[in-house]
Amino acid sequence: MAKDVKPTRKNLMEIEDRIELSERGHGTLEKKRDGLIMEFMDILDKAQDVRGDLADDYEEAQKKINMARAMEGDVAVRGAAAALQEHPEITTESKNIMGVVVPQIESSRVSKSLDQRGYGIMGTSARIDEAAESYEDLLESIILAAEVETAMKKMLREIETTKRRVNALEFKLLPDLYENQEYIEQKLEEQEREETFRLKKIKEKKEQQEKEEQEAEAAAEAEAEANAKDAGTAEPDMEQSTAGGVPGGD
């Protein structure tokens, strides 16, 4: 992947920004994951209690209904059940737990008094009343269990999603970004060294040229001075030769 990235300072800055953003996101997701796990453990404990209560309520309701059938008969039990006028009402709302929307189920008119069940008090026995009361308790446990189980499943899905995101950042995206960053930094360092070496060579070459020019100038000056000196020495010799020749002529 690093070979697909151009080693430029602009790309390096962009990658550094992405690394910073990814590291912040990774930290935030880790905190969210840990918080979700803690909330999930609380809900799991509650779900275990609810499941136990539900099993107990179901067993108790079965005992009561079986007793009512044995003592009063199926006809009397069915007649009492059919006499119900007001049915329970279920309303669903939602609440937010660590960013996860879970249902909040509210129920009303589940538990009823004797006169609200619809059947006549004189025509039934206490066993039917006990069976009705047991099934009302069972229904409330079912509603609570539905709320807790649904919340638990949603929390579990969100935990798995968050864990996948954390792992993707930790084991895929961030290592790739670090690799790209290291690749670009190495290439830029190589380019810097090459540029430094090139500038050093240019400087050395320029200094060599200046040195040669200075030596050439010095040689030219020395030669000029020597020529001037030779010319100065030759002029007196000529004067002496001229002066010596005149007397001989006379």
Image (cartoon, helix red, strand yellow):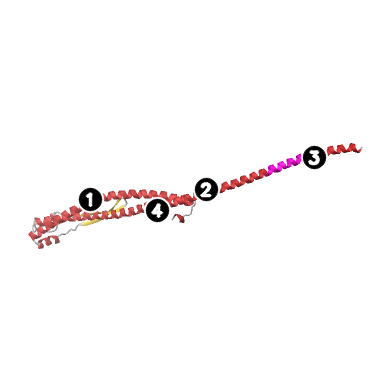
- Name the residue nearer the viewer: 229 or 132: 229
* Mark carried by residue 126: none
Q: Residues within 10 Å of mark 3 (few under 14, many from 20)?
A: few
- The tag earlier along the polypeptide, 4 or 1, is 1
- The tag earlier along the polypeptide, 2 or 1, is 1
Residue highlighted by disc 3:
234
Q: Nearer the viewer, mark 4 or mark 2?
A: 2
Q: CA distance from mark 2 to mark 3?
A: 60 Å
- Name the residue nearer the viewer: 172 or 237: 237
Q: CA distance from mark 3 to mark 4?
A: 90 Å
> Residue 175, can we see it?
yes
Amino acid type for the residue under numbered disc 1 = Lys
Q: Quadrant of residue 224?
A: top right
Residue lying at the far right of the rendered structure: 250
Residue highlighted by disc 2:
193
Are discs 3 and 4 less than 8 Å apart at CB?
no
* Residue at disc 4, secondary structure: helix
- Magenta-highlighted residues: 216-232
Task: Measuring from the top left, give residue 84's x and y in whole percent.
Answer: 15, 59
* Mark carried by residue 173: 4
* Mark carried by residue 46: 1
Q: Nearer the viewer, mark 3 or mark 4?
A: 3
